[in-house]
Image (cartoon, rainbow, N blue to C red):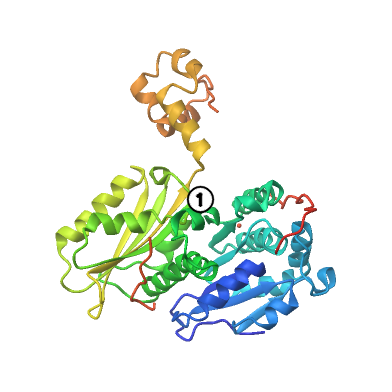
Amino acid sequence: MLDIKPKHPQAPCIAVFGVGGCGCNTINQLSQSSLSDNVVLIAVNTDAQSLAVSACSSSLQIGTEVTKGLGAGADPQKGYAAAQESEEQLREHIQQADVIFITGGMGGGTGTGAVPFIASLAAELNKPLVAVVTTPFSFEGLQRNQLAKEGIDNLMQHASALIVLPNDKLAKTLDKKITLVNAFFESNRILQDVLAGLTTIISQSGLINIDLNDFITVVSHRGRAAMGVARQAADEELQHTINKSLKNPLLEDIDLTSAKGAIVSVMATEQIELSQYHKIGEILQQALADKAVVIIGLTIVPELESELELMVIATGIGDKEANKEEKEAASGIGDTVASNTDERFGQSELLNLHDFLAEKSQNPQTTSYSSSEFDTPTITRRSPNRVFKRCLNDGAA
C-alpha cells in the first residue's frame, strides 16, 4: 500500500479523498495544481473504468464483490455496501493522515453512500474531517435531490465540518457563456485554493502562527462550514477582499453570524500595516457570532504578488431553519409561554438563549422551557448510518 507519510516529518499529513465520479473529477483537477508534498490525493470509486484514467498516484476501487467494478448504479445503498466491503483499506489510509478532506457528489450512488461511511471511519479514529460536497441541478429531478438531502443529513452526523456547493449556483453565478467544463473547474477551485492555503499555514511557521491544533479546534465545531480565498489587488478596498473570502457565491446560502469558529490566514508582504491587520480582525469578528472562536494568523511572504491574501474557514454554522428558530426563541417570538410563565427572566435575559439554557441546567428546580467571485492565489500553494432509500431512477455516481 502507498505510504502517505509526508517527506517532512513535522508537516501534518493531509489526505484528500475524492469519492465517486464527481469526487474523482475534483481529485484529477487537484492533481494538476501545485500542492505541497504533504497533501495526498486518493481517488475512490466503484467504477474501475473511471479509476483507470485517474491522474492520482493513489487510487482505491471499493466494493469489488458488491459492484463488480461496474459502479453503484445510482444506488446509495450499494455505494454504502461497497465502502463497507473495503473498510480495511479505507481505514489504513485514514489512520496515516492528520487531517482528512473528502469530496464527492450527493444524489448518485457511490458518493452519496460511501462518503458518509468514510466520514464515520474518520470520526471513529478521531481524525478531523472536512467534507466538501455538491448537490444536483434542480432539473435532475425531485428524487435525485431528495437523495442528496438524505446523504447530506447522514454525513452531518460524522463530519467535523460540511461545505455544500449547489450545482444550481453555477448557472446563477457564472457567465452564461461559460463552458460546462470551466464551470466545474471554478467549483473545484474552491477546494483547491483552500487546500493550498491550509497546507501552507499549518506546514510552516508564520509571524503569527497557526498550527494543526488551532485548525482542529476550529473544525471541532460541528455543522455547516464556509471557506474561501481572496487576493487583494493594489486598488481594491480591504473590505471588498474580506467579503470575497467570506461569501463565495458558489457556496450554499448560510448565516455566518451563527458560526462558532473561524480560522483566518493572512499572507502579506513586509509592507502590511498594523491598521490593515487590525481591520481584518475587526471586520471578521463583526461578521461572526460574538462568542465565536476566531484564530487569525499572519505569514510574511516577501515575493507575494498581491497586496495580501486571505483564507477563511468558518465552522459550526447551523442550518437556516435552526438559526431562525433560535433567534425567534431568543426574542420571545417563537415561544410566548417561555416569555411569560416565569417572571424571574426579563426580556433582556431571554435575548441570550445560551445564558438562559446554562442557568436552567445549573438549577434543576427551574421550570423547563422549549422552543422549536474568483481569484487564483499566488501561494502553492464523522449513531450508525441510516439505510438509504433505494434510488430507482438513473444517475451518475
Which residue corresponds to the image point at 54% horizontal and 78% vertical from the top-left? 40
Which residue corresponds to the image point at 73% horizontal and 69% vertical from the top-left? 87
Pinpoint residue 161: horizontal percent, then vertical percent.
52, 56
Locate residue 229: give its quadrant: bottom left
Instruction: Using residue 65 as the reference point, say whether residue 15 is left or right of it.
Output: left
Which residue corresponds to the image point at 67% horizontal and 70% vertical from the top-left? 91
Q: Is residue 54 visible?
A: yes
Instruction: Using residue 337 as the reference point, say whether residue 46 is left or right of it.
Output: right
**Label 1 CA crowd tier, 10 Å (few <14, some 14–19, many 20+):** many
Q: Is residue 151 visible?
A: no
In the image, residue 358 sits, relative to residue 85, either above or below, namely above
Pinpoint residue 221: horizontal percent, then vertical percent.
48, 51
In the rendered image, which residue does mark 1 sit on?
224
Residue type at the position of mark 1? Arg
Locate residue 198: give its quadrant: bottom left
Instruction: Using residue 311 as the reference point, say whether residue 363 is left or right of it.
Output: right
| SS assignment at label 1 | strand
Task: Pick whichever, 350 or 246, lies toward us.
Answer: 246
Q: Quick one: quadrant of the N terminus? A: bottom right
Pinpoint residue 323: horizontal percent, then vertical percent.
47, 37
Locate residue 243: give its quadrant: bottom left
In the image, residue 212 sits, relative to residue 96, either above or below, namely above
**How many numbered discs?**
1
Task: Pick whichever, 85 or 236, lies toward us.
Answer: 236
Q: Quick one: quadrant of the C terminus? A: bottom right
